[in-house]
Image: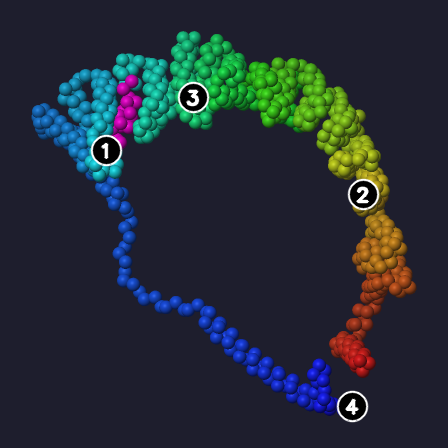
């Protein structure tokens, strides 16, 4: 074919050059592409260099900056002023107390008066210049000097006068002077350039602090007792409260609030102690008046103070004070236990005010006060409740020792009955009634009803012990409580019924007839509750537990031995297994099965004293477990059944004094091999070690150990025969486990039989023979290893040639 073209080729037709020309063209194009690529790469490297950030220039060390002050100028100023005022105050006190006697009366008065006036006058000039901090320091020093002036005046002018009266008068006068001084300095005009107010902050709060003392000191000076002094403290607290509400300066208001709380708390504590220690109506009335005064102050604050939280707190405090006041009057003519009811009645009475036309924060505070009183009353009943609920547990160590005289004696077997608990049932039922009737909120209604039900249950439980009802009546009451609670649909009611059943069962242990009757009744009641769905899992478990206890109690009543009682207890696992097969709820089913298992373990423990009975019990437990394993979801219980059957067989052999290990191991080997055969039929891929290994090892290993320790020939012969048969079966069916286990057992058994002869042969051989035999063995193994390597190499070469 010619690659040449005609000269007259049309323009629209494609010209195809010869191959050599086309190759040169392609080489030229590739060369140009390479040159262009190199150019682009060079340009790219330059661009990357340009885009890289410039390295920071080295930082030259700058001259050291001046250190930064650690304290600001105002702080330094305040510290200096404070230290100066403190030192001047100490110097004035030292001058007054130590150096006073070296001067005459005129000189002393002149010095103190001049220094005091100068000190109190200096802040006026300082305030006009805008030096407020310095003025505050000198004002504080001046106030201290006025105290020293009062002391000096008493020592000079009234050395023999009544010190308490002088102190009251001095406190009153100084408080007034300090207040006037603070108000007077507040009216001074400050400089036009002053940024702060020219008012002194210290005199008015100091005057209020000193004003806490005059009223109390005047009462003490007038010979007032504890009650009058407490009244003075409370009045002072009320005044502080009014000051806190009406005065605007923050410092004064802060001091007033502290005084109101401090003096009010002191007064309330003293009034409460007076009320509790009042021995007659008069003393109680006086204490009530004090508490009412404190309550009036608290309620006034509840109406006047800002903020709902503070109003609620003060209203709650007022409500508690009212309860303490009225309850203190009722406490005097009543015994201690009835006084609790008096306080509780007053606390419940506060709820009448809660529904009145009062502000919401006040009503909330009164409700909290009523709840607090009821809570305290409930706490006082806890000793009686705890003794009633937990005291009967002591009968576990005194079973059938005799019925006690009454319900209280039954509950206090090892612990004493708490004192002053006669009215505990009334307190509980009163609070329960309030919860059931007074709480109407939708959010709290269900909780209140649950709490009321619990308190009503406590009331019913402690009533027989509190009233010391007969023992039989106490059991009957507890039983009726269980029935009543189980009839309700509330889960809490069912839980309380279960708790009551425990108390009732413990109480019934005092008498044999009571134990049998109570356990039988509880078994039936709780079985019915489980059937009706009242906490079915827990109720079913309790029912089976009481049934187990009933079986033990019945056997003990018949004077049966424990091993014979075990047969009676087995009725519970049987019942549990039958019920579990018909229950739909998986949780209830599991609880029933576990309860039956526990009862079965108890039966095994009871039967341990006699081996034949123990073997029978184990076999019966195995039957129960095997029956359970028939259910598809409980197939794994079959392993437990197998273990129980094996244990039963071993115990029976032990009872027959059988010492041959084969008698024990064949009971495991035969079922295990049968299971292995069935598994291999269903799954031919299953390993023989999994199917037959455990069963064969269970017999061959113990028998081999016994054969090595046996001096006779019978056991080794039988073992060798069995091992040979196992080896042949393994070879016939090409199974590793029978072949290896049987062959190893056969070899070891043969070695045991030939051991004497081998020992003779070894003794007859020269000493070089054993090393030589070992060397021959090693050479044979090495040759075999080399042969296998050579065969593998040949196979690899053949495969290589095929490729």
Query: How far apart, in angstroms, are the residues tagged by discs 3 and 1?
Result: 35 Å
The residue identified by callout 4 is: 1
Name the residue at 26% across, 36% down. Answer: 196
Magenta residue span: 199-215
Name the residue at 85% across, 40% down. Answer: 627
Dot 2 or dot 3: first in sequence order is: 3
| SS under mark 4 | loop
The residue identified by callout 1 is: 198
Q: Is residue 676 visible?
A: yes
Mark 3 is surrounded, within 10 Å at the Cα level, by few (under 14), some (14 to 19) or many (20 or more) other residues, namely many
Query: How far apart, in angstroms, are the residues tagged by discs 4 and 2?
Result: 87 Å
| SS under mark 3 | helix
Dot 4 or dot 3: first in sequence order is: 4
Dot 1 or dot 2: first in sequence order is: 1
Q: Nearer the viewer, mark 4 or mark 1?
A: 4
Where does residue 295 sit, x and y in percent of width and height?
A: 42, 17
Name the residue at 16% across, 22% down. Answer: 153
Where does residue 670 sit, x and y in percent of width and height?
A: 87, 51
Q: For residue 633, which numbered disc appears in the image? A: 2
Query: How far apart, in angstroms, are the residues tagged by discs 1 and 2?
Result: 91 Å
Dot 3 or dot 1: first in sequence order is: 1
Query: How far apart, in angstroms, are the residues tagged by discs 2 and 3?
Result: 68 Å
Q: Nearer the viewer, mark 2 or mark 3?
A: 3
User: Which residue occupies the foreground of this view, 758 or 608?
Assistant: 608
Dot 4 or dot 2: first in sequence order is: 4
């Amino acid at each position: 074919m010619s690659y040449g073209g005609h000269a007259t080729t049309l323009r629209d037709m494609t010209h195809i050059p010869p191959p050599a020309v086309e190759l040169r063209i392609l080489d030229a194009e590739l060369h140009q592409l390479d040159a262009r690529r190199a150019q682009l790469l060079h340009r790219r490297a330059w661009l990357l260099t340009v885009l890289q950030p410039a390295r920071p220039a080295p930082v030259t060390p700058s001259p050291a900056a001046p250190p930064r002050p650690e304290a600001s100028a105002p702080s330094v100023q305040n510290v200096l002023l404070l230290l100066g005022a403190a030192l001047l105050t100490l110097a004035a006190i030292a001058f007054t107390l130590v150096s006073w006697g070296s001067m005459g009366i005129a000189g002393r008065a002149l010095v103190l008066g001049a220094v005091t006036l100068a000190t109190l006058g200096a802040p006026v000039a300082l305030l006009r210049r805008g030096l407020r901090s310095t003025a505050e320091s000198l004002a504080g020093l001046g106030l201290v000097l006025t105290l020293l002036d009062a002391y000096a005046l008493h020592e000079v002018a009234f050395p023999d006068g009544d010190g308490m009266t002088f102190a009251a008068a001095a406190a009153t006068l100084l408080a007034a002077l300090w207040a006037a001084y603070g108000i007077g300095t507040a009216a001074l005009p400050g400089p036009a350039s002053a940024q702060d107010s020219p008012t002194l902050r210290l005199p008015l709060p100091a005057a209020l602090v000193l004003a806490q003392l005059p009223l109390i000191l005047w009462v003490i000076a007038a010979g007032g007792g504890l009650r009058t002094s407490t009244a003075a403290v409370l009045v002072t607290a009320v005044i502080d409260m009014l000051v806190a509400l009406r005065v605007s300066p923050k410092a004064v208001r802060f001091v007033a609030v502290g005084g109101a709380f401090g003096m009010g708390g002191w007064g309330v504590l003293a009034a409460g102690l007076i009320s509790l220690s009042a021995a007659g109506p008069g003393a109680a009335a006086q204490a009530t008046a004090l508490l009412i005064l404190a309550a009036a102050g608290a309620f006034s604050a509840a109406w006047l103070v800002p903020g709902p939280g503070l109003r609620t707190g003060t209203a709650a405090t007022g409500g508690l004070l009212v309860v303490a006041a009225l309850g203190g009057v009722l406490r005097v003519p009543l015994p201690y236990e009835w006084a609790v009811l008096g306080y509780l009645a007053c606390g419940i009475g506060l709820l009448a005010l809660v529904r009145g036309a009062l502000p919401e924060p006040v009503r909330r505070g009164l409700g909290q006060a009523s709840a607090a009183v009821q809570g305290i009353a409930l706490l006082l009943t806890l000793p009686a409740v705890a003794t009633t609920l937990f005291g009967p547990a002591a009968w576990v160590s005194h079973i059938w020792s005799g019925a006690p005289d009454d319900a209280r004696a039954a509950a206090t077997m090892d612990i004493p009955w708490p004192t002053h608990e006669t009215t505990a049932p009334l307190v509980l039922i009163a609070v329960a009634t309030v919860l059931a009737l007074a709480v109407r909120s939708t959010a709290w209604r269900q909780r209140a009803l649950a709490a009321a039900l619990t308190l009503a249950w406590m009331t019913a439980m402690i009533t027989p012990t509190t009233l010391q009802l007969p023992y039989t009546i106490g059991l009957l009451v507890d039983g009726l409580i269980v029935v009543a609670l189980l009839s309700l649909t509330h889960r809490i009611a069912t839980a309380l019924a279960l708790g009551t059943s425990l108390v009732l069962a413990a109480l019934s242990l005092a008498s044999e007839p009571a134990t049998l009757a109570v356990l039988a009744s509880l078994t039936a009641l709780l079985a019915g509750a489980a059937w009706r769905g009242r906490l079915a899992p827990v109720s079913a478990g309790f029912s089976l537990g009481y049934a187990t206890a009933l079986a033990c109690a019945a056997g003990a009543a018949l004077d049966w031995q424990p091993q014979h009682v075990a047969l009676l207890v087995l009725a519970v696992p049987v019942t549990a297994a039958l019920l579990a097969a018909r229950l739909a709820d998986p949780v209830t089913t599991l609880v029933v099965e576990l309860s039956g298992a526990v009862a079965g373990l108890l039966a095994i423990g009871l039967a341990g004293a006699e081996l034949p009975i123990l073997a029978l019990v184990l076999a019966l437990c195995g039957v129960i477990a095997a029956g359970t394993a028939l259910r598809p979801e409980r197939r794994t219980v079959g392993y437990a059944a197998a273990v129980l059957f094996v244990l039963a067989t071993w115990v029976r052999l032990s009872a027959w004094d059988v010492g041959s290990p084969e008698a024990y191991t064949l009971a495991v080997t035969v079922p295990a091999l049968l299971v292995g055969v069935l598994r291999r039929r269903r799954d031919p891929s299953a390993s023989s070690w999994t199917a037959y290994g455990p069963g064969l090892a269970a017999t061959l290993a113990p028998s081999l150990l016994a054969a090595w320790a046996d001096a006779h020939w019978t056991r080794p012969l039988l073992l060798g025969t069995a091992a040979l048969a196992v080896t042949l079966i393994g070879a016939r069916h090409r199974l590793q486990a029978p072949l290896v286990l049987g062959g190893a057992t056969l070899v070891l058994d043969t070695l045991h039989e030939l051991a004497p002869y081998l020992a003779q042969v070894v003794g007859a051989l020269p000493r070089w023979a054993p090393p030589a035999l070992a060397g021959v063995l090693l050479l044979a193994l090495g040759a075999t290893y080399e042969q296998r390597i050579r065969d593998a190499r040949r196979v690899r070469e053949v495969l290589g040639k095929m490729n």
